[in-house]
Amino acid sequence: MITFSGLASGLDSASIVDALVGIESSKTFSLEARKSALEGQKSVVSDLVSKLKALEDAGKGLDTASELNTLKASSSDENRIAVAAGGSAQAGSYAVRVNSLAAAQSNASRTFATADPGVLAAGSVDITVGADAPINVAWDATNSLYDIAEAIRDSGARVNASVLYDGADYRLVVTGTDSGTTNAVSFVDNGDNLDLANPTSEIVAAADANFTLNGISITSASNIVDDALTGVTFTLETVHEVADSDSVVEIERDPDGQKESLQTYVDAYNDLMDLVNSQLTFVEGASGAATLFGDSTLRGLQLSISATMTAAYPSGATTTSLGQLGMTLDQAGKITIDETALSDAVLNTPDALADLFLGDGVDGLFKRINDTVELYTRTGDGLLAAKTDSLDDRISSYDDSIERIENVALKLREQLERQFSALEAAMAQFQVQSGFLAALGPVS
């Protein structure tokens, strides 16, 4: 239906309707503002959960004594022997001499003028590696040397196989994947074969590595040895010549490495405190309804975290605190690491970090922090989860109120438009009748 506002009455009825409906709709403005503030608070709560989880994750790389007690290892001659140390290693100095290197066995087949299909008629080879069960690989005249090499690689035997061309002849070379005499490879040839069982086919014998550690002889099937000295991995590179002096391996505490590991955790903690402090510190013009300024849940989190960081933790008959290790809290509750004090503390008391963060196995800084994170972020009944649910309920309530007001405004518009339309129709009818009467002239 097309309406012409005010044509009969002279009133701008559309503007009147818009104005009256606008007055009704304006009741949503304050509700929208409150809803927006709650959504801002909900965003802050989400950020808090993320930063608490990040703090928990940062601690996962430091939750064992071996991760906290970092050490560094060095070799006086890395061309002979390289070394790496884990947290379970013990500081010390060791004389190391490499006498022989481990090797994987390698065998070469008889020579062939071609590698093409038909190079061999039907045949097979049984391959046995160490104490493994024999594995049979068969072929026929349709297979090339490359096909046979691939079949050996795919057989499941712990060997590799490839075809070698020396410029005149082809050979198939089989090499064990594992070094050491316990992984020696034996062959049984069948039919038209590769002649790998021939003793002369062996081009590299399986061999064990041998080295001395402070004069004690050690044998290994591998050149990478991680079971000779607790927490230490040796990589044997080359053999010492007779005239060479022993290599010296040093295992020592690594304060720089510990500081680097701690810094990740400290950064995550300080990042959390930056957010907490920004919410609880009043800034005129900035602290408003969209923040958690004065919020009791956030204040409780701040107090709980601060108490955890300033506490002393049991270690036998003594206790250890952050301050004793050169880590101090400023007025904002953020941690600063004094590298010199940390290094001195760790050198004087090697287990100090483990005593602080792990405590007596039942009570330590990590456990308390993680318990706090769990208390606040746990799905369902966590304190911040409950706060999010409460904010969602209030936002939903505002949405319902806003929807009711908008529905009332819509109905008001419809009602006013009907009323003004009826008014315009009545006025138009009156004007028609008035004109008709005027046309009749005065009554005599």
Image (cartoon, grey):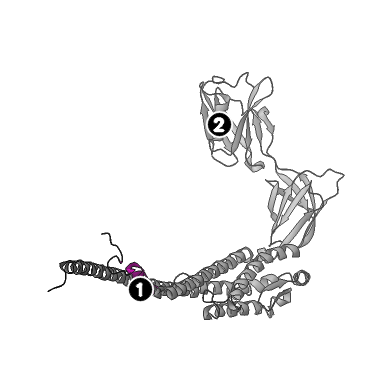
Q: Residue at x 54, y 38 (%)?
A: 156
Mark 2 or mark 1: which comes first in sequence? 1
Residue reaching furthest front?
444
Is 293 or 416 nearer to us in this picture? 416
Horizontal placement of 404 versus 301: left or right? left
Q: Is residue 6 magenta?
A: yes
For this rendering, which residue is in front, 386 or 5?
5
Look at label 1 and name its amino acid.
Answer: Leu
Residue 164: which quarter of the image? top right
Label ID, residue 336: none
User: Image point 47% across, 75% down: which residue?
Assistant: 387
Give coordinates of residue 67: x percent, y percent. Answer: 66, 63
Question: Alpha carbon of mark 2 to alpha carbon of mark 1: how far?
Answer: 87 Å
Q: Which segment did they paint magenta?
A: 1-25
Location of the C terminus by quadrant is bottom left
The residue depicted at 60 percent of the width and 32 percent of the height is: 161
Residue 90 located within the stretch drawn in magenta: no
Q: Quadrant of residue 398?
A: bottom left
Q: Amino acid at mark 2?
A: Glu
Location of residue 296 in the rendering, given as x and y in whole percent from the top left corner: 53, 81
Q: In this figure, what is the number of numbered marks?
A: 2
Q: Which residue is mark 2?
A: 150
Q: Which residue is mark 1?
A: 20
Residue 305 in view of the camera: yes
Answer few, some or many: residues within 10 Å of disc 2's Cα (few below 14, many 20 plus, some between 14 and 19).
some
**Circle 1: is it few (<14), some (14-19), or many (20+) Cα within 10 Å?**
some
Q: Dot 2 lies on which element?
A: helix
